[in-house]
Image: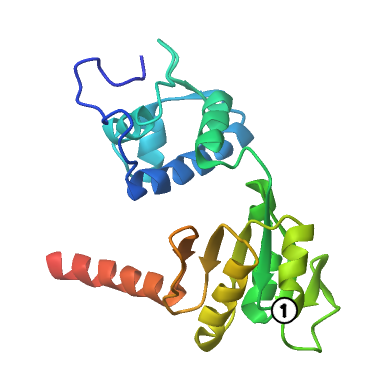
């Protein structure tokens, strides 16, 4: 039976979900989807955790925040667990997003096919460069930033993606908030201020590389 033992300490019902748990759920989802693509129908906490560098106990504890998903003598049914995790993450529905910044990074993001596979659709791009306005990138039309507010309502845009220089990021964030977006993914290398009603996730590629170099240096010093 691939579930926590009945006498094992578990999460407090109704308590806050740690951010790290939500991050690991996304990793579990990707691995489960890969297993399904490989023709696997079931998996176990040890197999799932082993591929990602987590213990089987960690996998069971994370999933226990949301219920029990294992089957006695079987483990986890991949398709059932994928459906459950998608519902938990909110990706069992379609999310419409707007991208602001049609430069090199913005173009790369528009070409990323993973958004669509996970339930996210960039329905419009925005820029202040008149040479880009009116063009299409990966079948996504680029509009003038001044059209953001109107199109956000028309296209029911709930998420915003910022791919502009740091100096312009806060101004763009303010426009997205005014347009009614509920969450912002910020690729600009700067911290933006948002009201409590709007959620944000920052992605700074330089910081990620710094963390990677730190991990390598720390390992070398510890050897």
Vertical arrangement, residue 43 with respect to residue 164, above or below: above
From this viewpoint, which residue is outermost toward the right? 134
Q: Is residue 20 left or right of residue 173?
A: left
Q: Give coordinates of residue 177: x percent, y percent.
A: 57, 67
Residue in front for this viewpoint, 197 or 128: 197
Residue 176 to residue 181: above or below: below
Residue at the limit of the structure toward the top, as seen here: 72
Q: Where is residue 188 shown, x and y percent of the image?
A: 51, 77
Q: Residue at x 45, y 73 (%)?
A: 205
Q: Residue at label 1?
A: 145
Report the residue at 34% width, 41% height from top: 17
> In the rendered image, is residue 223 in sight?
no
In the picture, the quarter occupied by the N terminus is top left
Q: Residue at x 63, y 47 (%)?
A: 118
Q: Nearer the viewer, residue 19 or 53?
A: 19
Q: Secondary structure at mark 1?
A: helix
Residue 149: image x %, image y %? 71, 69
Q: Position of residue 173 (x, y in %)?
A: 55, 73
Looking at the rendering, which quadrant does residue 144 occupy? bottom right
């Amino acid at each position: 039976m691939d579930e926590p033992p009945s006498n094992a300490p578990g999460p407090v019902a109704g308590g806050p979900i740690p951010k790290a748990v939500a991050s690991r759920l996304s990793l579990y989802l990707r691995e489960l989807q890969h297993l399904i693509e490989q023709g696997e129908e079931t998996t176990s906490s040890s197999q799932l955790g082993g591929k990602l560098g987590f213990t089987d106990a960690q996998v069971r504890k994370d999933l226990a925040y949301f219920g029990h998903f294992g089957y006695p003598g079987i483990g986890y049914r991949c398709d059932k667990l994928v459906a459950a995790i998608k519902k938990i993450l909110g990706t069992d529905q379609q999310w419409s997003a707007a991208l602001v910044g049609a430069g090199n990074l913005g173009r790369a993001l528009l070409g990323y096919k993973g958004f669509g596979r996970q339930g996210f659709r960039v329905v419009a791009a925005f820029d202040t460069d008149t040479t880009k306005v009116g063009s299409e990138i990966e079948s996504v039309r680029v509009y003038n930033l001044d059209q953001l507010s109107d199109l956000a309502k028309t296209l029911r845009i709930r998420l915003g993606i910022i791919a502009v220089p740091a100096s312009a990021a806060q101004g763009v964030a303010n426009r997205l908030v005014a347009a009614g977006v509920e969450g912002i993914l910020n690729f600009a290398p700067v911290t933006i201020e948002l009201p409590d009603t709007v959620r944000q996730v920052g992605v700074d590629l330089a910081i990620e590389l710094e963390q990677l170099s730190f991990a390598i240096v720390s390992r070398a010093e510890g050897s």
